[in-house]
Image: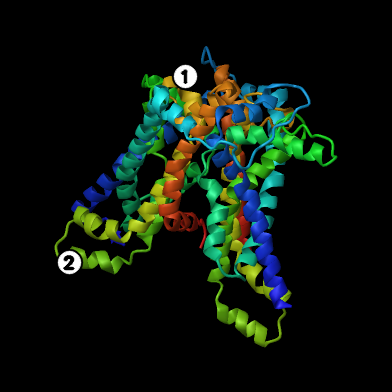
């Protein structure tokens, strides 16, 4: 580690940092602080109104619906992704051709949403291919995109896209656990379940932390599928915060947007800090 | 007993693999069907009747006509494809020029407030686009950049994610290596160019692959900041087409897919390393 001792090194350090720091200041830090300020003012006349904007969005039905759906979506898809991917990763470490399996699981990450929009419509429309199969095998047809099922289609597409990512992280975590510890446990007569629950899972806490946060971040990107397949006003069950921000933006409801952005930022920030605390405490 | 277990694990993965690849398989089969066959496939989508979409897995008259229609008679497509290349290419180039030196400064120098600043970088890297949407709009509008390609290029250049990822690669380089270069009289820029970049290469490449795949799929930013459809990147232009042009849509989807799959295949190792490097805790 180089201390910025000499003047010359100070200059270099500053020069290296400067382009990024300037850009981040201009496009991220300062505008965000400005949004925080805006959230306490009216949008048009710039009059200070205290927490009024926050009161307005708290009473707003669309906001309540979007928060509820986003929370529900997060609460369902993240645990589902974590559990399914862990189960698969644990299996993968027991067999060969890991590379091939990892390639297949990762592949959806490379596929642009735009390229699949029409395929999702072919599969999930009321007259779509899946309904064709359901009806021809004697079941009733399901309205996948315009009923509560839309929520589950979205959960499915989220898992489809993110499974590979999480499996890579889990497999790396599992492989890192030293074989000698596991061998020693086996010698002491530990069964497979003992090894899984007493050695492997407790050792994966840092991996779990990363996966939780990255999966959460990526859960916001399901907006791409939801918006491109079902439009700006999809079925109520998949009307997410992302739709709401987008619609407020189009209607130029900037005061509401500012307050909602600050609120959502605070919640995410608190969640990250809380997770970090939990992780540090148990360590 | 053990054999049966292994066989069932392989079987499980075969089923999962088939489910994962099935939509992609359809995406590849449909564009090589001729227009009559495609029309029959798609007609039910536009009606409310009781007919359902059916898919011929083996096209009756396989043809490349749809591709020649797209590539020869749809000049608009080239414009949009070029938009995507231009936008993604310039973001990647400038992202590296900005992120590499700053990641090096974070990894190898000590300065006041470093930890706080780095934590701020990480926190904003974890925030979804929607949080920054209004803030960025106000800056871009102030610069009179709305509805230009720069409105999606400039903010993306200063994304803090590449800094974090490249930092990870640099932090793994032992300090002794650069110190010996310094003793040999190299200045700090030479140390970065001759030691940092060659040794941190895999971090940089991982960042390129991950960023490319994400940017090639960019939807939220152009949706918010660009109104003129002629300036849309492929990732937004394609889904906005009328379903009546299903043949064009399907064919364009394959052409959109090709660069991403190409990068995926040649960069899979770096992609995996990049994913592993996102580990927030070790």
What residue sits 41% from the left and 29% below the top?
B71
Q: How is the image coloured?
A: rainbow
Question: Extreme front residue here?
Answer: B61
Question: Extreme top residue here?
Answer: A45
Q: Nearer the viewer, residue B167 or B10?
A: B10
Q: What residue is shown with label 2?
A: B183
Q: Position of residue B49 (x, y in %)?
A: 77, 22
Please indicate, yes or no, whether residue A32 appears anywhere in the rendered image: no
Q: Position of residue B50 (x, y in %)?
A: 78, 26
Numbered circles on residues, count: 2
Q: Secondary structure at mark 1?
A: loop
Decide: is B190 above or below B229: below
| Chain of the residue displaying label 2 | B
Q: Work out how far the residue at label 2 is from the one at label 1, CA to CA, in angstroms.
A: 55 Å
Q: Secondary structure at mark 2?
A: helix
Q: How would you rate the neighbour count of disc 2 (Cα within 10 Å): few for under 14, some for 14-19, many for 20 or more? A: few
What residue sits 45% from the left and 38% below the top?
B216
Q: Position of residue A197 (x, y in %)?
A: 70, 70
Decide: is B238 above or below A7: above
Q: Nearer the viewer, residue B174 or B40?
A: B40
What residue sits 62% from the left and 40% below the top?
A267
Direction from residue B94 to residue A38 in the image, left or right = right
Q: Nearer the viewer, residue B7 or A83?
A: B7
Decide: is A10 above or below B130: below
Q: Nearer the viewer, residue A116 or B209?
A: A116
Direction from residue B136 to residue A221 in the image, left or right = right
Q: What residue is shown with label 1?
A: B227
Dot label at residue B179: none
Mark 2 and mark 1 residues within 8 Å of each other at the beta carbon? no
Which corner quadrant of the image does residue A157 belong to?
A: top right
């Amino acid at each position: 580690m180089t201390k910025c001792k000499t003047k010359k090194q100070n200059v270099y350090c500053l020069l290296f940092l400067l382009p990024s720091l300037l850009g981040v200041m201009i496009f991220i830090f300062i505008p965000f602080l400005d949004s925080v300020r805006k959230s306490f003012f009216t949008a048009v006349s710039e009059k200070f109104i205290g927490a009024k904007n926050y009161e307005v969005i708290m009473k707003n039905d669309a906001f309540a619906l979007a928060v509820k759906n986003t929370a529900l979506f997060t609460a369902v898809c993240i645990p589902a992704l974590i559990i399914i991917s862990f189960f698969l990763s644990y299996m993968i470490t027991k067999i060969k051709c890991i590379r091939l399996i990892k390639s297949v699981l990762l592949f959806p990450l490379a596929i642009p949403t735009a390229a699949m929009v029409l395929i999702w419509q072919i599969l999930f429309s009321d007259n779509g291919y899946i309904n064709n199969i359901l009806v021809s095998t004697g079941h009733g047809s399901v309205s996948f995109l315009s009923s509560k099922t839309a929520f589950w289609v979205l959960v499915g597409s989220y898992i489809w896209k993110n499974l590979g990512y999480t499996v890579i992280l889990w497999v790396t975590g599992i492989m890192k656990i030293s074989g000698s510890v596991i061998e020693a446990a086996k010698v002491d007569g530990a069964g497979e379940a003992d090894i899984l629950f007493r050695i492997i899972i407790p050792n994966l806490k840092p991996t779990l932390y990363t996966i939780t946060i990255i999966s959460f971040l990526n859960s916001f990107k399901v907006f791409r599928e939801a918006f491109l397949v079902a439009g700006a006003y999809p079925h109520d069950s998949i009307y997410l915060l992302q739709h709401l921000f987008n619609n407020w933006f189009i209607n130029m409801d900037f005061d509401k947007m500012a307050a909602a952005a600050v609120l959502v930022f605070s919640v995410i920030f608190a969640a990250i800090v809380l997770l970090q605390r939990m992780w540090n405490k148990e360590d | 007993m053990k054999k049966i277990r292994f066989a069932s694990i392989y079987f499980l993965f075969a089923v999962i693999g088939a489910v994962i690849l099935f939509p992609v398989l359809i995406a590849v089969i449909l564009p090589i069907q001729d227009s009559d066959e495609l029309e029959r496939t798609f007609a039910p989508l536009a009606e409310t009747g009781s007919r359902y979409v059916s898919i011929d897995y083996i096209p009756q008259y396989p043809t490349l006509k749809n591709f020649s229609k797209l590539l020869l008679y749809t000049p608009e497509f080239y414009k949009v494809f070029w938009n995507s290349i231009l936008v993604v290419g310039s973001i990647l180039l400038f992202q590296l020029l900005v992120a590499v030196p700053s990641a090096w400064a974070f990894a190898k120098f000590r300065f006041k407030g470093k930890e706080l600043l780095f934590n701020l970088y990480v926190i904003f890297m974890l925030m979804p686009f929607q949080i920054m949407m209004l803030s960025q709009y106000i800056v871009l509008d102030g610069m009179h950049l709305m509805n230009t390609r720069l409105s999606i290029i400039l903010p993306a250049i200063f994304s803090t994610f590449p800094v974090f990822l490249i930092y990870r690669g640099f932090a793994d380089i032992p300090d002794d290596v650069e110190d010996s270069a310094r003793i040999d009289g190299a200045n700090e820029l030479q140390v970065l160019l001759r030691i940092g970049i060659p040794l941190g290469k895999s971090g940089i490449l991982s960042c390129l692959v991950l960023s490319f795949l994400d940017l090639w799929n960019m939807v939220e930013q152009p949706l918010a900041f660009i109104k003129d459809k002629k300036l849309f990147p492929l990732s937004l232009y394609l889904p906005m087409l009328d379903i009546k042009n299903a043949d064009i849509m399907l064919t364009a989807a394959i052409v959109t897919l090709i660069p991403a799959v190409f990068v995926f295949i040649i960069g899979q190792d770096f992609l995996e390393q990049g994913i592993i490097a996102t580990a927030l805790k070790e």
